[in-house]
Image: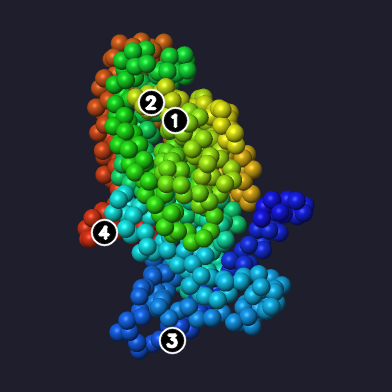
Amino acid sequence: MLYVASSLHLDVKILNGDEVKVARVLLDTAIELSKNAEAQNHGKKNDSSRKWKVGLASVAGAALIGITGGLAAPLVAAGLGTVLGGIGLGATAAAGYLGALAGSGVIVGGLFGAYGGRMTGRMVDKYAREVEDFAFLPVRGSRQRLRDEKEAAKQDHRLRVTVGITGWVTEEENFVVPWRVVGAESEVFGLRWETEPLMNLGNAMDLLVTSAAWVAGEQVLKKTFFASLLSAVVLPLGLLKVARVADNPFSVAKARADKAGEVLADALINKVQGERSVTLIGYSLGSRVIFSCLQSLAKRGAYGLVDSAILMGSATPSNAQHWRRMRSVVSGRLVNVYSENDAVLALLYRTSSLQLGVAGLQPVQGVAGVENLDAGDIISGHLRYQFLVGHILDRIGLEGIDIDEIKREEAALAAKDRRQEQERIRNERRAGIQDSDSAQQKLESGELKDEEDRLQRQVEERTHERLPLRHNEPGRQDLHSAHEREGEHKS
């Protein structure tokens, strides 16, 4: 449709507006059919035709609707013409355009994945058994959930779906907040996955870059990575010791990302999104989840499920073989965003298969249809990706980016930079570092060995404080309250 609109020289905003209107009336129609069928079958609780139920409520906050086997009542042309009149389709024209779609409420609702509730309802519970905390969190509803399912349909549901995948967290709201920049033309979800390992990683990286050892170590990494593929023997002893604080959390989270990607692929194959196109966006290990997902889809021959994929600061190989396989299952744009200034990624990825390259540090070459964006001018460190999602997506040319959210990102990043600088100064004074020369000397001599123990204790303390009680009852606690908060990125 984007190609058709472009060929006709139509503003993409017109297409987006029409898609929103179509999504609203189709889902409203499905919900009304559900209510009518339920009323007609009321009292037949023991009827053998009652095959299944779907919870539409869950995270989206809609009312529970029991959908029976007798739901598939005909959608007559007159009724269809009424609901689609708002976009200029008459009864005969609407029936002609929709064809078989006009004959079943199940088909109409299935377009959205069981009436829009499958991505946030019980249909994804089975995936949580494979990967801890696996859930799709609606970004639009993270600030204000609507209690009436019809109103929720009008406000939130779209013909396109975007899934944003965070690569680490220091607060649970990090699963949702970075993706608020994505425009309202798409129904946006944040993927929650493996909260505890990601929080361990986030706290470890946050403390690593404010440590006394990092001041000199960062410069060493930037000078040696591409020249020597970061051979461990060329790195200062002090830096290697401090790196251990983040090495284990990164290794654990990386392995979980591979598994989460396979589970995500399975979810898409089973149409949790309905029949809608899906755009996947991720940064850091979130990009690795996408990488694993696309690899799995390619191996299983599952084509046509993913419209576009954007990988930022990707902790994945950059070799042509892997990316050519990914390209085969992405029908639209496949984008690799990288920065040669990302010293944290260089350090953490040093024990992986470096001979295959690192997509987050260099362009992908030799694969037709893969776009590369060098974000080195704004990504001076790995932790900045979380706050620059909007800027990067705007550079890529993604439509409908929320400018107000970009401004909030900028304010949150500035606050984080100030806090990190203050912590870094305190840590340098504690270690007796006065200038870059003394930092280099202490780094090479290993005099900063106490730094490792201190950082490890702080990582454990922060994770314990920020990770809510998760297993006080069967299944994990719901995160509704966290997603309703109006707070921005924690600084």
Give whichever of discs 3 and 2 has the lower sequence position.
3
Q: Tell me what residue is drawn at x 47 percent, y 14 percent.
A: 227
Q: Amino acid at mark 2?
A: Ser
Q: Tell me what residue is drawn at x 43 percent, y 33 percent.
A: 315
Residue 327: x and y, percent?
53, 39
Instruction: Say few, some or many: other residues with alpha carbon within 10 Å of mark 1 (under 14 / 14 to 19 / 20 or more).
Output: many
Q: Is residue 159 left or right of residue 342?
A: right
Q: Amino acid at mark 3?
A: Ala
Q: Which residue is mark 2?
A: 353
Residue 375: image quadrant is top right
Residue 90: x and y, percent?
70, 77
Instruction: Say few, some or many: other residues with alpha carbon within 10 Å of mark 4 (under 14 / 14 to 19 / 20 or more).
Output: few
Instruction: Identify the mark at residue 475; answer none if there is no mark.
Output: 4
Instruction: Assess whether mark 1 and mark 2 are in contact (beta carbons under 8 angstroms).
Output: yes
Q: CA distance from mark 4 to mark 1?
A: 35 Å
Q: Amino acid at mark 1?
A: Pro
Q: Which residue is mark 1?
A: 317
Instruction: Say few, some or many: other residues with alpha carbon within 10 Å of mark 2 (under 14 / 14 to 19 / 20 or more).
Output: few
Q: Amino acid at mark 4?
A: Gly
Q: Secondary structure at mark 1?
A: loop
